[in-house]
Amino acid sequence: MRIRYRGTATVALAALTATFTTGIAFAPSATADARSTPATSGRVCMFDAPKGALSLGHVAWAFRWSDGSDTWDYGATLANSNWEKHGTEQQMLHDFATATDSGGYQSYRCKDTAADDQSAAESAVTAGFARAYNLVDDNCLTRSIEIFKAYDGSGGLNSLPDGKFLFPNAYFNYDLSGWDASKSL
């Protein structure tokens, strides 16, 4: 069993408790250092349909539920409709791989996030679906970014460009710095 400690006070308390209980002192591992990189809690993904919108591209969004399960919310904004589904990661990948909207999704990129505010992301989805679609500044790309930023309440994704006046293919290929490499569906 591996135990991760969050701070030096917690480590000291754990060491003292272990010494008192077992009579054996131990030295904390390097993973117990307060300067360790914090664990991620969330994950978001962007899916690309490169033939959509006259080959300028179409993107869709996904985020993992905050309850620790392998359940995802995922969906897309299209000029004349929106859709949203819930399922496991495998179901999500299957649904995107077999979707026919916008010429078909061919690849995706994901990123771990420090926060996972599922409720805020759902609110962003609902708000986006309630607005009229606008090809220039309220479209599949801008709404995906809004959802990602709402989900990661830590602000870790705030540096993402807002997607206005940008082609989804170019954004997917060049503006997702720090995201996983593109994977084929």
Image (spheres, rainbow, N blue to C red):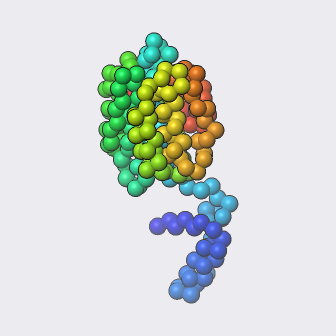
Vertical placement of residue 148 versus 2, above or below: above
147 horizontally vs 72: left or right:
right
146 vs 60, left or right, is right
* Residue 133 sits in quarter: top left
Q: Nearer the viewer, residue 153 or 177?
A: 153
- Indicate the position of residue 28 as horizontal and vertical percent values: 63, 71
In percent of width and height, residue 106 lies at 42, 24
- Residue 20 location in percent, x, y? 56, 87
169 relative to 2, above or below: above
**Residue drawn 54% across and 42% down?**
149
Residue sitting at 38 percent across and 44 percent down? 72
Q: Residue furthest right?
A: 35
Classify residue 161 by image quadrant: top right
Residue 114 position, x and y percent, is 56, 51
Task: Identify the residue at horizontal 52%, vertical 67% (top origin).
Answer: 3
Q: Please say whether residue 146 is visible from this viewpoint.
A: yes
Camera-nearest residue between 7 and 146:
146
Q: Is residue 93 visible to the viewer in this orientation of the structure?
A: no
Residue at 61%, 41% in the rendered image: 158
Question: Dividing the image into 4 quarters, which one contains the C terminus?
Answer: top left
